[in-house]
Every structure is written in structure tokens, then in C-alpha cells.
Amino acid sequence: MREGVEWAVHCCINLSWVSPDRAVPAARLAEFHGLPAAYLNKQLNALGRAGLVSSRSGPRGGFRLGREPEEITLMDVAVAIDGSARAFLCTGIRHQGPAGGIADLAGHRTPCTVAQAFSHAELAWRHNLASRTIAELADTVRRANPAAPDQVRRWFDRT
Amino acid sequence: MREGVEWAVHCCINLSWVSPDRAVPAARLAEFHGLPAAYLNKQLNALGRAGLVSSRSGPRGGFRLGREPEEITLMDVAVAIDGSARAFLCTGIRHQGPAGGIADLAGHRTPCTVAQAFSHAELAWRHNLASRTIAELADTVRRANPAAPDQVRRWFDRT
DNA sequence: GCCCCCGTACTCGGATAAATCATGTCCGAGTACCTACGG
DNA sequence: CCGTAGGTACTCGGACATGATTTATCCGAGTACGGGGGC
């Protein structure tokens, strides 16, 4: 998993706390977390293509959430940054070389058991991430530190 | 996930079918699946360090399973090849820059909610892989293609 | 005084380098077998 | 004939290249604000 996913999730949580009518520049988000501004911009860019955030250029431009925080799952973010490609890619080695002659014995190609097993595990992972929303995480943070949302909003509201 | 994991699992299944008193050289396993021999050797090497296979040098040397197939889980293989490092590494950006001042507000460092969420998802993945053994997968294959085990053993028994 | 136009400053967006990691290769260390020699 | 020592062939194990992917940077495209000029 690319670490940009972590950045993106934190950014989404923070964005859910700033005034909805205020766009936050990538540089400001980067400063807040001590991250390289240009690179973070690239990641937010990816979120934009996925529709998770909306972006505008120019003065008073920047990023804001593209949907309600309740409608953004961790899976959405992960897919936007990492891409939707499967982590485990069955390369079909079962059918290469002498092994192929045995696997394809009856002429019917049964699904690769190994790939199936890993797919199941990955599906569990995906489901778990898909069941968690930004709003939920933000709320958990707020519960542990009730002042955080206001503090964050205020920090971003400062010029 | 590195694709060496896929290779390793297939190799383990095949090893569970060859005569237990017979070690299989890496080159032979590689040939069976049409894989680069030297590199597969490297992967099997990793399995050896983890104790999943035992290895011997010299003539009639090679690899054989280090435990019963029932005692080898997919998680074991994945860890042996990929390493046990978490896929999602919390880099602690929550405490960098101005964000740190807010997160550490009360002087008590609460666990990072984002990291926790991803850890849960990853744990689901790990549990799923840990519940699947090589023996189980081998049996599934055998059920779909009853002749496979014998065919495989015979192939490896050929000089 | 009001409106329009232009210049400026600011921010995104994608094209372009640098670094890191996975992939792949090679050669030395180790081991068993086979052969030859001596008892 | 039996035991032993040495050579040889085979295989693992880790050190060394290579290529792809991730990380990071830079500059052009786009947009709103502000000032100046004209009506």
C-alpha cells in the first residue's frame, strides 16, 4: 500500500472539518502535516479524478470534499490512490510448462485454487475498508479529542 | 503482494505430493512451472529461513516440506516471502507540523484512528490467510482433478 | 460615478527527474556419491 | 575383500546487476481579484 493513502485519508478528515465554503490549497494541507507540497498535490489530484474532492484553480482556490464525509469510504480513497488493481495477481503459472499438461488434463480449465484463496482474503480486506467512512473516523477522533475539529478549522481559517 | 508468494504456494502444494523421502531441486520446480530457476531458488531460500521447507545441498539435495502440509498456512508463506511488515505503515504524520500541536493537545497520545482502521482491515486479511492451509488447498485441487497428485509425483520422480 | 478591460498573483494539473524496491542473475560454499588406492 | 581418502558433480545460499514502480519536483494552464481607464 502506498503511503499516499495515509496522507489522503488524513486530508479528507481535516477537510471535513473546515468550512464547506472554503477551499484549502494543497500547500496548506501539506504544511499542516509536514509533507512535500507538490507531491501531496498530485495525490489530491488523484482524489479529484475519483470525485472524492473537488478542486478549483486560482486565488481562493484549492480542494474541498466532493461528497458528504458519510459517503466516502476508506476503500474509495485506497482505490483512488493505489488504483483498483488486485494486490494478488494470478499469473497463471499453473498452465505454464509441464504443469500445464496436468492442470488442463480433462480439457476443462478449473479455476486456480491458489488465486481463489488469496482473492477471498483480499475481498475480506476490501469489505472491511469499504465499511469505514471518513465521517466515522472523524467522529472517533472528535470523541477522543473534542476540541480537535474546532482547532483544525481555526488553523485552516487563518490566512 | 510480491508474485513470489504465488510461486511459493504452488511449490508447497507440489512438494506435498512428492515422496517425502525425496528432495526436489529448485531448478526442477522452476522447470515445472516455467519460472526462472535462480530466482525461485531465492524464494525457496526464504521459505527455508522460515522453517516451511528444509533444504540440503549436494547431489540428491533440494527442498522438501519442513512441516506437515496441515501445519503450513498461506499466511506463513506470505510472511516468509513478503516479510512480516505491515502493508499499511503509519508514518505518524499526525504528530508532524502544526497538526502535532492539536493531536497532542492534552499531553496524552491517543492512537492514530486512521492507522487503527487500516490495521483492522489488514488483520481481517491476515486472519483469512492464516485459516487456509497448504493441505486444504491441495485437497481442493485433488477433488477437482483426482489424477493430479499422482501425475505430479510421477513427473518429479522422473530423473 | 459606474462599468469594462487588462494585468497580476495564486493554485491546480500534468509532464519530467530521482530514489527505492522488486526482479533477475551469477558465483562461491557445502555435501553426497563415485573411484581409486592401500591394508 | 574391505575400509578409507580424494576427486567430482550437483545443489543451495547469498552477493551482485537490472528494470519497474514509487516518490518527489518543476513549470505551464487556468482562474479570481484588483487597478486603471473609458463612458
Image (spheres, coloured by chain):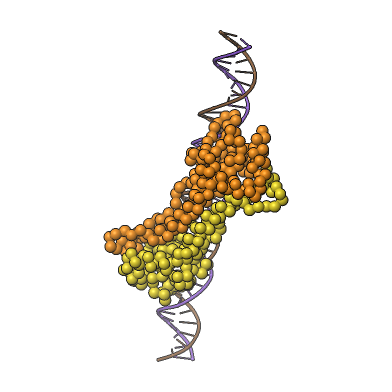
Chain colours: A orange, B yellow, C purple, D brown
Instruction: Give the percent coordinates (x, y) of residue A18.
Output: 61, 38
Residue at 44% across, 49% down: A85
Instruction: Using the image as rendered, state which of residue A3 and residue A121 is in the foreground.
Output: A121
Residue extending farthest to the left is A107
Q: Is residue B77 above or below residue A2?
A: below
Q: Residue at x 52, y 67 (%)?
A: B50
Return the x and y of residue B52 as percentages of the image width and height. Answer: 49, 68
Q: Is residue B146 left or right of residue A76?
A: left
Locate residue A145, reporting x and y percent.
66, 48
Q: Is residue A126 above or below residue B138?
A: above
Q: Position of residue D32 (x, y in %)?
A: 58, 26
- Asked whether, in this view, residue B28 is left or right of residue B118, the answer is left
Residue B54 visible here: yes
> Which image quadrant is residue B14 in?
bottom left
Residue appearing at x 49%, y 63% in the figure: B130
Q: Quadrant of residue B21?
A: bottom left
Which one is in front, C11 or B115?
Answer: B115
Quadrant (top left/top right/bottom left/bottom right) for the C terminus of chain B: bottom left
Q: How many marks?
A: 0
Let me know if residue B159 appears in the view: no
Q: Residue at x 49, y 49 (%)?
A: A130
